[in-house]
Amino acid sequence: MLKSIEYQLTSREECTQSDDVLCAGVYWVAHRLPQLDVVDYEYSTYAGKALVLRSIETPPRRIAKGFQQIVLDESRIEGQEFFTLEYTYISNPIISEKLYGESKKKKLKLNATPVGEFKP
């Protein structure tokens, strides 16, 4: 669940590690994002589809690439807000609609495209 936070910029001297203050000049690295196997390979459009589908049933698993359209199996996302896609060459992180909405409310400069419209 996302916590609603009011952000204000402060000087370095005023900067604390409070959840209520965004410190000027401090950035965070998003790391160890969960990799989720949530691509719906049946409905997505990508290169080598027959080989990838066959590898799901008979390992070793092939990495999907050359996506023209990505469809996610939302039943397997299990409430994750920020993740990457396993078994693909797509390195862009995926964020939930809820997280995207929160970033827009806070007027954060975040470039994002709905998954169904994304062209890698």
Image (spheres, rainbow, N blue to C red):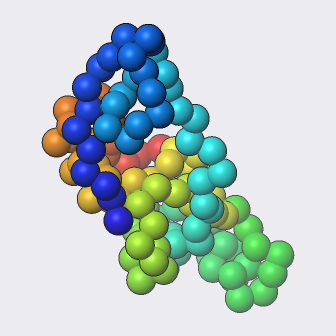
Indicate whether 11 appears above or below 43: above
Please tell me which residue is depicted at 48% across the width and 22% down the height of the picture: 26
Farthest bottom residue in view: 57
Which quarter shows the N terminus? bottom left
Q: Is residue 78 visible?
A: yes
Front residue (pair 52, 17)? 17
Decide if residue 28 is on the left or right side of residue 56.
left
Residue 70 falls in image quadrant: bottom left
Residue 119 locus on image (x, y percent): 41, 46
Please tell me which residue is depicted at 22% across the width and 38% down the height of the picture: 6
Q: Is residue 69 visible?
A: no
Residue 34 locus on image (x, y percent): 60, 61
Please tell me which residue is depicted at 66% across the width and 64% down the height of the picture: 87
Indicate whether 27 appears above or below 84: above
Residue 40 locus on image (x, y percent): 48, 75
Residue 71 falls in image quadrant: bottom left
